[in-house]
Image (cartoon, rainbow, N blue to C red):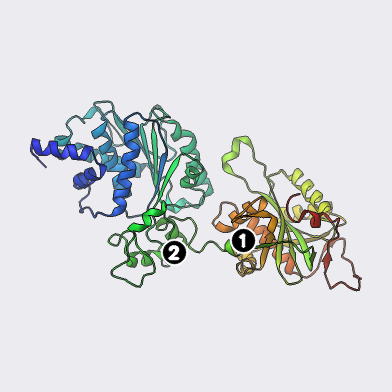
């Protein structure tokens, strides 16, 4: 495309001052279909521009940027293709690193970025931005002013390279997001490798653009920091919007007035598209929540509706009280801190005389096998012999032997061994029914305002996302404790009293005033 010099200067002047105008003007250099403008594009351009200008002007970095937007919203075209080309209009020497989950995707984004810079329109408007003949490869090209674009797949090498701006676009393959090893590898690479490849750490900016795919995906890792700005734009108001003031831009679907939610983009993502994507055989509830609602948990929560948890003062007298152990023989080592081994969990649960379930205490630790067995025995002594001890038996001879060894160490206590022959989700169904019906209580002392504290906070946080949480130990342990509460009293080890006091009901467990469980009321051990 040929344009007059005066026209080119006018376009250049307008586009240098506005990334949005640049996107509108240069869209056709890389995309055949015309641009469908929507408010979210304006928001993306404004956020990217503000971050880049500070870096270009050598101003101290205020924050890195996280952008969670639905698939099909032109995020890659804007953030990974047109945005770097615009940065060079302001600073031809800017160094840009682009990262994606796989080399082919990273290379394709780089190729299209180069297409924009090499187009006749761009060269006419910005003649000062020239591609260097010395470095003009498919995934790595440079400008004659010293700027460059380098593209890399997750886990790839960026040795010797430094970026003023780093754009991380879809670092996780959606088809592999449930792989804990994949999550660990990508988070470790971003945190320990990519984060160090900056021109100057106090100035260089990082932009993470992705759909939410897991509760511990790179977005979750970034959100643990304080110096980040989070833009979360779900496809409809069914999802959480951040910042909340963006909600004012959502509109009803004119083609479907009965659709219960407002839409981010009625042209790109109408309700008919969203309903189709959500359906079975396409994405399903979890996939839809991740890719369109920017939530790694389906709407309505997980299997456990933690808003239905109740709290109160434990009564101190119960029909039955048990401590169930979900064992893990792992200890957190310094060299493997990113791998997050499983937890050993011991949950104290009781059933009172009006059939409320009380979670009174939770042990959640990472210990080697020897220290774990010491903890189980020590806790049994502190709980007292009124408490039934439940031990899981994993499938196979090793699981049986482990359970038998624990039983031997608990001689004199009432012990029940439960074989785990079904999957975790199936085992959790019955306990989830009770919790979701409002029949599960935690000690009121662990409720502070609208939040939980102590061990209750970790328990509720895991149950909130379960079974999509990274760890499932507490949910599985609580479900097994409930199974033990419901089972007939068949024990291994010392037998319960056969002639209870005349005033006591069958299986009534009355905790004395000096009983450890009664005194501690689930607070701490």
Relative image position of residue 483 (x, y in whole percent)? 70, 66
Secondary element type, mark 2: helix
Q: Earlier in the sequence, mark 2 or mark 1?
A: 2
- Determine which residue is flagged by label 2: 284
Dots 2, 1 in contact, CB < 8 A = no
Residue sitting at 89 percent across and 67 percent down? 497
Secondary element type, mark 1: helix
Residue sitting at 62 percent across and 35 percent down? 334
- Distance of label 2 from label 1 (alpha carbons): 20 Å
Q: Quadrant of residue 335?
A: top right
Front residue of 358/277: it is: 358
Q: Is residue 420 visible?
A: no
Relative image position of residue 499 (x, y in whole percent)? 92, 71
- In the rendered view, tell whether residue 169 sits above or below residue 450: above
Front residue of 120/8: it is: 8
Front residue of 494/506: it is: 506
Relative image position of residue 327 (x, y in whole percent)? 70, 52
The residue at the far front in this view is 449
Residue sitting at 78 percent across and 66 percent down? 320
- In the rendered view, tell whether residue 191 sits above or below residue 430: above
Total marks placed: 2
- Name the side, left or right, on which 407 lies relative to 97: right
Q: Which mark is residue 424?
A: 1
């Amino acid at each position: 495309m040929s344009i007059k010099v005066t026209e080119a200067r006018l376009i250049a002047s307008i586009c240098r001052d506005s990334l949005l105008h640049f996107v509108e003007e240069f869209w056709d250099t890389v995309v055949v279909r015309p641009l469908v403008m929507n408010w979210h594009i304006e928001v993306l351009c404004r956020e990217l521009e503000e971050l880049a200008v500070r870096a270009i002007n050598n101003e101290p970095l205020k924050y890195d940027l996280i952008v969670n937007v639905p698939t099909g919203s032109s995020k890659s075209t804007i953030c990974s293709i047109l945005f770097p080309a615009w940065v060079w209009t302001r600073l031809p020497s800017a160094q840009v690193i682009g990262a994606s989950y796989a080399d082919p995707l990273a290379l394709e984004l780089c190729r299209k970025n180069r297409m924009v810079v090499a187009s006749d329109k761009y060269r006419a408007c910005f003649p000062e931005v020239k591609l260097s003949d010395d470095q003009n490869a498919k995934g790595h090209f440079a400008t004659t002013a010293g700027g460059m674009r380098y593209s890399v797949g997750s886990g790839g090498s960026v040795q010797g390279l430094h970026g003023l701006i780093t754009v991380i676009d879809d670092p996780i393959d959606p088809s592999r997001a449930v792989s804990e090893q994949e999550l660990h590898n990508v988070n470790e690479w971003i945190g320990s490798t990519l984060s160090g490849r900056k021109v100057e750490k106090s100035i260089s900016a990082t932009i993470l653009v992705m759909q939410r795919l897991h509760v511990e995906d790179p977005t979750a890792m970034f959100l643990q920091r304080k110096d980040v700005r989070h833009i979360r734009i779900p496809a409809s108001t069914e999802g959480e919007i951040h910042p909340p003031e963006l909600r004012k831009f959502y509109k009803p679907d004119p083609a479907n007035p009965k659709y219960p939610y407002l839409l981010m983009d009625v042209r790109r993502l109408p309700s008919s598209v969203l309903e189709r994507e959500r359906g079975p055989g396409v994405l399903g509830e979890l996939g839809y929540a991740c890719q369109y609602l920017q939530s790694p948990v389906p709407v309505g929560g997980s299997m456990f509706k933690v808003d239905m948890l109740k709290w109160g003062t434990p009564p101190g007298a119960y029909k039955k009280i048990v401590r169930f152990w979900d064992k893990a023989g792992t200890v957190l080592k310094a060299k493997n801190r990113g791998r997050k081994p499983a937890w050993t969990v011991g949950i104290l649960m009781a059933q009172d005389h009006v059939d409320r379930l009380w979670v009174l205490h939770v042990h959640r630790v990472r210990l080697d096998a020897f220290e774990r067995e010491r903890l189980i025995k020590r806790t049994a002594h502190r709980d007292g012999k009124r408490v039934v001890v439940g031990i899981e038996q994993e499938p196979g001879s090793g699981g049986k032997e482990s359970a038998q060894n624990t039983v031997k160490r608990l001689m004199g206590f009432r012990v029940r061994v439960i074989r785990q022959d079904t999957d975790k989700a199936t085992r959790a169904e019955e306990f989830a029914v009770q919790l979701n019906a409002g029949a599960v209580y935690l000690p009121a002392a662990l409720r502070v305002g609208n939040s939980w504290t102590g061990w209750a906070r970790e328990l509720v946080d895991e149950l909130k996302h379960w079974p999509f949480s990274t760890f499932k130990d507490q949910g599985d342990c609580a479900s097994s404790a409930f199974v033990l509460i419901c089972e007939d009293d068949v024990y291994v080890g010392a037998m319960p009293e056969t002639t209870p006091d005349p005033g006591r009901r069958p299986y009534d467990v009355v905790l004395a005033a000096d009983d450890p469980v009664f005194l501690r009321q689930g607070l701490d051990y």
